[in-house]
Amino acid sequence: MKQQSFSSLEYAHRKKRSKREVFLGEMEVVVPWARLEALISPHYTRPRKGRPQMALAVMLRIYFLQQWYGLSDPGAEESLYDIYSMRDFAGLDLAQDAIPDETMILNFRHLLEKHDLTKALFAEVTALLQDRALLLRGGTIMDATLIAASPSPKNAKGRRDPDMSQSKKGNQWYFGMKAHVGVDAKSGLVHTVKTTTGKVHDAKLTGDLIREDDRVVFGDKGYVSDKRRRAARAKGILWAVKDKRKRGHALSASQQKRNKRHGWVRAKVEYVFRVIKCPFGYRKVRYRGLAKNEAQMFTLTALANLYLARKRLRAESV
């Protein structure tokens, strides 16, 4: 046990908890820290010379703080100095501990990217949710969302990110990448994540988002395909993709009713996108290249799943 400093004692007697404290308190309970640290530990813990290595538990918490609050590496370091609740969540005390600098934070992120550990973290969280019967099988909702990237060529190379591309939605053009997800139709939690450049059509990843044991598949009008519908029906799968109006023909009353009925279920896929883009603030890619942004998307999706399931996970931990 660390000896409490005057600042921590003063903070412990505050009259009100901030929203950040409440959120971090919930995530402290629901994140499976031991399981995630066990995945990273073989790649992180090693004999080294120079300054002592920061504890893995501290670095993992700082990495998650970056995802929840959209912090850059320098921004994470500054926040640890400025914000007590973040420092407390990471298990640091200014009076006793050294605060990791931006280089240490950067190196930890690069370690996760180098060994594909964010994908492993997502898989471990998925396994946890399946063990708790929170992520079920039998039905999938498919969808994709655009994540913007900077279209400006004003950089050292004098050109835009070659891994990003333009995509048209409605009458508006967007530049960036796409995140494709397969969501459990019952719980609304993500079981599959894929990323592509922005110009890739949503329907091209249909086969990657459907699980082998799915018996019903939901999707919006972007996934309409007579060929895939016939193939699904041949396998005994209910193809619950919304009908799309053909040129010169309006949807029939039965098609409109069917679209509305399936739309209530399909709407669950929007929950995870709302969490990633609103509470987590991930509306624009932070890095150049698809690989780094894909690694971050795995982490964001895993944390979004835990956030969406936090009430049920907390109820089981009591």
Image: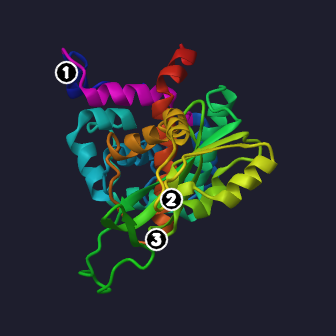
**Residue type indicated by callout 1:** Glu
The N terminus lies in which quarter of the figure? top left
Q: Residue at x 44, y 47 (%)?
A: 59
Label 2: how many Cα within 10 Å (few below 14, some 14–19, many 20+): few
User: Which residue is nearer to you in this view: 103 or 310?
Assistant: 310
Give the percent coordinates (x, y) of residue 209: 63, 52
Rendered position, 164 above or below 154: above
- Label number found at residue 60: none
Give the percent coordinates (x, y) of residue 306: 50, 34
Q: Secondary structure at mark 2?
A: loop
Q: Nearer the viewer, mark 2 or mark 1?
A: 2
Calculate the distance from the C-alpha at mark 2 to the C-alpha at mark 1: 66 Å
Give the percent coordinates (x, y) of residue 142: 57, 48
Q: Residue at x 51, y 56 (%)?
A: 222
Give the percent coordinates (x, y) of residue 112: 53, 57
From which residue to which does the magenta span run?
15-33
Residue, far bottom = 158
Rendered position, 210 above or below 133: below
**Residue type indicated by callout 3:** Lys
Magenta stretch: dominant SS?
Answer: helix
Q: Which scheme is used to colour this image of the protein?
A: rainbow
* Residue 13 falls in image quadrant: top left
Label 1: how many Cα within 10 Å (few below 14, some 14–19, many 20+): few
- Label number found at residue 10: 1
Q: Nearer the viewer, mark 2 or mark 3?
A: 2
Residue topped by disc 2: 246
Q: Secondary structure at mark 1?
A: helix
Residue topped by disc 3: 199
